[in-house]
Image (cartoon, rainbow, N blue to C red):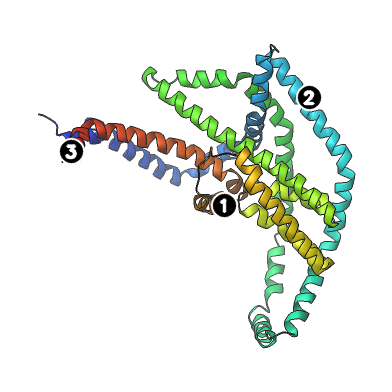
Amino acid sequence: MKTSRFMRFIGGRDLLFGLTLLILIGIIIFIYTKVSFIFNPILTVLSTVLPPVILAFIAYYLLNPIVNLLERGHINRIWGIIIIILGISGLLTGLILLTAPAIETQVKDLASKFPTYLQQMGEGIDNWIQNSFLAPYYEQGYTWFTSNLSDVTSRITEHLGGAVEGVQNVASTITSVVVAIITFPFILFFLLKDGDRFKRFCLKLLPPKYRDEANQILHNMDVQVGSYIQGQIIVASCIGILLYIGYLIIGLDYAITLAIVAAITSVVPYLGPMIAITPAIIIAIVHSPIMLLKLGIVWAAVQFLEGNFVSPNVMGKTMQVHPLTIIIVLLVAGNLFGVVGVILGIPGYAILKVLAVFLFQKFTARYNRYYGDDYGAYEEK
C-alpha cells in the first residue's frame, strides 16, 4: 500500500518507532519516581564530581587556545600544558600573597562595620521620612508591621533550632570546595592533553552516517560556550579593574574588596551589577551624599565603557541572544538550580540553542523534500 506524502513527512514507520521509544522513556521515568532512593548514591557521586569537572571545563576553554598556540610553535603539548599550569599557578600565588593582607583587613573591617552602616542608613532614612510628607503613612506602616509581624522573633528562634544541621551543611560545602580545588587541576591536565582524542572516541561510538553531523554539533557548541566563557572572564576582569581605579579616585572605602565583588558577580548578566553595587551604595550613603554622587558617576562611566567598548569588542555577537531571553533564562535557571543555575544558565541555553537550530534545519530540509514543489508552485501563482 502506497504511503501518503504526509505520512512520509512525519516519519512513516519511523514515527511508530519514535512513539514506542517515547512510551518506553515515559515508563522509565515513572519507575524512577517510584524507586528514586536507589539512585541516591549515584547523585551523591555526581554532586561530588561535577564541581571540579565544571571548573576544569571553564579553565579548559580559557587555556586550550594558548596550548594550541604553543603546540603550533613546536612545543610539545604536554610540556606546553605543564608550563601554562605552573605559570598561572605561580602568577595567582603571587597575586594572592601580594593582595591577601589588604583584602583580609578590608573584609574583616567591612564585616564588623557593615551592621553599623545598615543601622546608620536606616536611621537616616527614618529621620528623613519622619520630617517629610510620608510621615503619616510611615506611622501606619509601622503599626501594621508591629501588629502582623510581632512573632518574627519566635519564628527566627524556631529556625535557629536547626543550627547544628546548618553547621553540618556549611562543613560539607567547605569540604566539597576544597576537594574541587585540589582535584580540578588534574582533570584540567587530562582535558587539555586528551580532549580531542576523547571527542574522536565518542564520535566513533556513533553510526558512521551520523558522525559528521554530530561533529558539527559539537563544534558549534564548543564555539558558543568557549566564546561565552572567555568573553565573560575578560569582561569581568575589565569591570573589576575599572571599578577599582574609579573607587580609588573618589576615595571610597574598601575599594579592592568592592571591586572584586563586582568582578565576580558581573559574570551573571543584569543581576550581577545590581548585587555588586548594593554594598557600595550603602557605604557611600553613610559616608556622605557627595560620595553617593561620585559613586553614581563612577558606575555610569564603567557601565558606559563596558557596554560600548569592552563587551562589543570582546563578546562580539557570538551568542546572539536577546536581552529579554537572557533575563527569562536567568530567572528559570535560578529557580530550578539556584546559584549554579544562574551562573551556568546562559552556557546551557547556548548548547540547547545549537541543538534547536540543528533540529530546525533538519525539519526544514525534510519539509522541502516532501512539500517543496507545492510551495514553489504556490509562490509562482
Give me the C-alpha separation between circle 3 and circle 2. Answer: 66 Å
Please name the amino acid that badge 1 sits on: Gly
**Numbered label attached to residue 334:** 1
Residue 48 position in % (x across, y down): 64, 37
Question: For mark 2, what is the residue?
Answer: 86
198 relative to 344, above or below: above
**Numbered label attached to residue 380:** 3
Foreground of the two, 70 or 191: 70
- Left or right: 244, with 308 as reference point: right
Residues at circles 3 and 2 in contact by the CB criterion of under 8 Å: no
Please name the amino acid that badge 3 sits on: Glu
Residue 362 quadrant: top left
Residue 142 quadrant: bottom right
- Quadrant into which the N terminus falls: top left
Badge 2 element? helix
Give me the C-alpha separation between circle 2 and circle 1. Answer: 35 Å
Closest to the camera, between mark 1 and mark 3, is: 3
Q: Residue drawn at (75%, 62%), measured in percent from left and top?
A: 281
- Left or right: 310, with 316 as reference point: right
Q: Residue drawn at (64%, 38%), measured in percent from left and top?
A: 51
Please name the amino acid that badge 2 sits on: Leu
Give me the C-alpha separation between circle 1 and circle 3. Answer: 50 Å
Badge 1 element? helix
Closest to the camera, between mark 2 and mark 1, is: 2
